Amino acid sequence: MEKIFIEPTRTTPLINFDPDEGLLEMKGRSSPENSIEFYQKILDNLEEYALSGGEQFTANIAFEYFNTSSSKCLFDVFKRMSRIEDSGKTITINWHYEEGDDDMMEAGEDYSDLLDLDFNFTEIEED
Amino acid sequence: MDYLRSYKNIYDQNIILMFKGELTFDLVTAMIGSLEERLDEIEEDRRVKKKFYNVSTECIQNLYYHLDEVNSDDKLISSFDSHSALIMIAARKRFYSLQTGNYIPTEKIGEIQKRLDDINAVSADELRALYKKVLAEQEFSDKGTGGLGFIDIARKTAGQKLRYKFQPVTSTVSYFTFQVRLPRVDEN
């Protein structure tokens, strides 16, 4: 496992994965040209975390927007988190969305429902 | 030449973005960036602005991924046009409209039309269920697309049907026009 830090761009989110802390942060917008390529490293590391990571894992997610291709990749990201949980670890998923953004809230609900994961939903106030 | 007169029609119809040509990913990103700036100026409702930004990004990226499917025809379609997209975004008083046009292989019409008709036939709740089903079950295509684009666009423009038209151009190629509308005022 390796630390991953990716600065956000217009089409890719901020990514901060710290295996020592058991932390994954994803924040911003996601509409990269190749979503599969962009998310692959995160998927691989989460896979490994399920096998050899610490007992606690926290994901802080705050997307402003993601396209449908990223949406499929995020489904795989959460699937890996569900595996981390299945391996006996404690997992916390915080899903932040902008005040009034029902679409983003529903997106979180959909992942939570499909993968049987508990999400903590938090509205963030507008700037 | 009275250029202003020929452009006047465009200005009068509140068109905020118009484009014809081949697309690169950087161009798509720049176009969406410029659309966003324009929306910041003209749209006060934050939610409408966000929804339209989302729908436009999905539509234009979708178009970008599918522009390489038609080959040129010497007589009717130039090699430039065969890979060209047409994009027109208008801000009307009551709704935003995004219209796209591109050449597609005629053999693909059946599949696209079925998907659009299926989406137009269902309620908002059923649309959400359909989205979740595709999200969980469908594999990525060779192009890295997930089959969710149209469903997502329909979810975000709830209550508005996806409008489309297919017109034959040659024996193997057709022209596909697609239009979405997003209401600017809350109609509930």
Image (tube, rainbow, N blue to C red):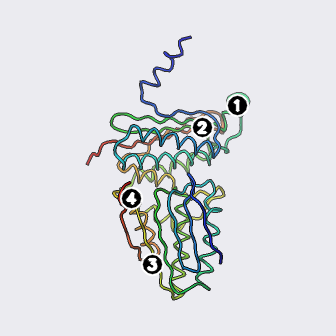
Label 2, residues with CA under 10 Å away: few <14, some 14-19, many ≥20 = many
In which quadrant will I find the N terminus of chain B?
Answer: top right
Query: Which type of secondary structure does the marked residue at label 4 adopt?
Result: strand
Distance from the alpha carbon under mark 2 to that under mark 1: 13 Å
Return the residue found at the far right: B74
> Seen in the image, is B54 located left or right of residue B170?
left
Query: Which circle marks residue A92 in the picture?
Result: 3
Distance from the alpha carbon under mark 4 to that under mark 3: 20 Å
Label 4, residues with CA under 10 Å away: few <14, some 14-19, many ≥20 = some
| Residue at the image position 55 percent from the left and 40 percent from the top | B31
Residue mark closest to the camera, 2 vs 3:
3
Q: Position of residue A10 (x, y in %)?
A: 56, 51
Q: Are the two marked residues, 4 and 3, in contact with CB atoms closer than 8 angstroms?
A: no
Distance from the alpha carbon under mark 4 to that under mark 2: 33 Å
Residue under pointer 1: B78
Query: Which type of secondary structure does the marked residue at label 3 adopt?
Result: strand
- Chain for mark 1? B
Label 1, residues with CA under 10 Å away: few <14, some 14-19, many ≥20 = few
